[in-house]
Amino acid sequence: MPATTTTSQRALNQCEEGAAILEFALVLPLLLVLLAGGFELGRALLVQSAITEAVRGGTRYLARVPDPTCRSVCSAGAAHAVALATDQIVENTRLALSQVRVYPLPDPPSGTVMMMAEVVLSVDMLGWVGLSPTMRLTAIHQEARVAE
């Protein structure tokens, strides 16, 4: 026996009330993920910029100290350059000190000094999609030694 369509059923099938809210509800999670991703990307770019500037400043200071190496233990000047760069990164990014590592690179090209910073940035959104929830950002800067 074929099903008969009543007038009320036909009217219900043609009704479009509430379609917009349903479509919005379906698209909302994607919009929220894109928005959160944009914030995380902006934060990562801000942190990268901050560590690049801090390493540049620390390397410029390091180029002017008598002993820029940190082979077994940093000289006072090299330790001060590392502390300056570390403090600037922590201050400008509001990251924990344990997330920041700054050090002079050993054996730079002759007549230069090099410094590197590594920052471990927590990005919870990456964990939501099954990736590692941390991102490692690095910055390296090389500067010519200043003649004494």
Image (cartoon, helix red, strand yellow):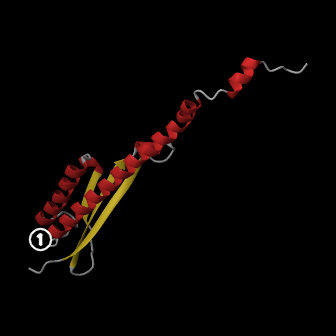
The amino acid beneath tag 1 is Val
Residue 147 % position (x, y) = 11, 81
Tell me where residue 66 appears, x and y as whole percent. 11, 73
Query: As drawn, which residue projects farthest toward the right?
Result: 1
Pick the residue in front: 100 or 95: 95
* Outermost residue, left side: 148
Q: Is residue 144 above or below residue 118?
A: below
The reply, left or right, for residue 139 in relation to residue 130 is: left
Task: Please identify the quarter of the rendering in which residue 75 is found.
Answer: bottom left
Residue 50, horizontal then vertical, whole percent: 26, 57
Residue 70 visible (yes or no): no
- Which residue appears at 59% of the width and 31% of the height? 19
Q: Which residue: 27% across, 62% down?
A: 52
Which quadrant, please, contains the N terminus?
top right
Determine which residue is flagged by label 1.
65
Crowd tier of the residue under label 1, counting other residues whose Cα lies within 10 Å: few below 14, some 14–19, many 20 or above: some
